[in-house]
Image: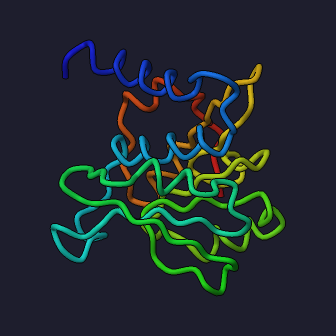
């Protein structure tokens, strides 16, 4: 791995996070979700075929508008296209590789995480304490910027491998989760 790769990732994430004028948080988070697909490795069994898409799901109230579709339009990661699916409720939830859990679902987080169990899903939310409660990645605001925390244990429990490059950009939650 070239030394410049982590610097490039940092620059790309910072550029999107600090682009001209105040960028709505949903747009910044959409870019982060897209970038997470590049730095997380899913078991091959989580894809039905070599050309199967990486599915990014949104559960609950959608904070992205069209930003998520605009961000992933025409993009591929490791030869896989990206698909967005939205679920209004837990009952509608279908398998996906990344699941953004909206703040509208905060009261149901324990139930959502139980239901996902050890599925190969990277869980992401901007709910306070999400990573400490068993979610994999939590967005948080810090001095007007979007940052993120990663629970390596939650990602590993889901059978996912998070790149050291991504971990180096995050606050890593080390508390043992249930």
Q: Residue at x 45, y 47 (%)?
A: 71
Q: Residue at x 35, y 40 (%)?
A: 39
In which quadrant will I find the N terminus? top left
Q: From the viewer's perspective, tell me whether residue 103 is left or right of residue 149.
A: right
Residue 156, relative to residue 116: is it above or below?
A: above
Compared with 176, 69 (above or below) is below
Which quadrant: the C terminus? bottom right
Residue 16 in the image: state x and y as whole percent: 51, 29
Count the marks: how many? 0
Q: How is the image coloured?
A: rainbow
Judge by depth and name the residue closer to the eye, 81 or 73: 73
The residue closer to the viewer here, 33 or 133, is: 33
Residue located farthest toward the front when viewing the structure as drawn: 21
- Measuring from the top left, give residue 27's x and y in whole percent: 60, 42
Q: Quadrant of residue 174?
A: top right
**Left or right of residue 9, residue 143 in this image:** right
Q: Position of residue 76 (x, y in %)?
A: 26, 52
Q: Residue at x 71, y 53 (%)?
A: 133
Q: Position of residue 25 (x, y in %)?
A: 68, 39
Residue 47 placement: quadrant: bottom left
Q: Residue at x 61, y 36 (%)?
A: 149
* Extreme-bottom residue of the structure: 91
């Amino acid at each position: 791995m070239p030394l410049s790769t982590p610097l490039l990732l940092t620059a790309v994430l910072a550029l999107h996070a600090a682009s001209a004028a105040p960028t709505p948080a949903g747009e910044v988070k959409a870019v982060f979700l897209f970038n997470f697909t590049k730095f997380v490795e899913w078991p091959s069994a989580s894809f039905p075929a070599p050309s199967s898409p990486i599915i990014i799901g949104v559960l609950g109230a959608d904070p992205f508008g069209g930003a998520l579709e605009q961000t992933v339009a025409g993009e591929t990661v490791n030869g896989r296209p990206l698909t967005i699916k939205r679920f209004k409720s837990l009952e509608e939830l279908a398998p996906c590789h990344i699941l953004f859990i909206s703040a509208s679902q905060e009261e149901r987080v324990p139930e959502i995480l139980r239901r996902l169990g050890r599925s190969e899903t990277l869980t992401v939310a901007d709910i306070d304490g999400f990573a400490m409660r068993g979610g994999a990645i939590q967005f948080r605001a810090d001095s007007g910027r979007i940052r993120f925390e990663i629970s390596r244990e939650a990602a590993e429990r889901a059978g996912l491998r998070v790149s050291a490059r991504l971990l180096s950009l995050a606050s890593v939650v080390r508390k043992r989760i249930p």
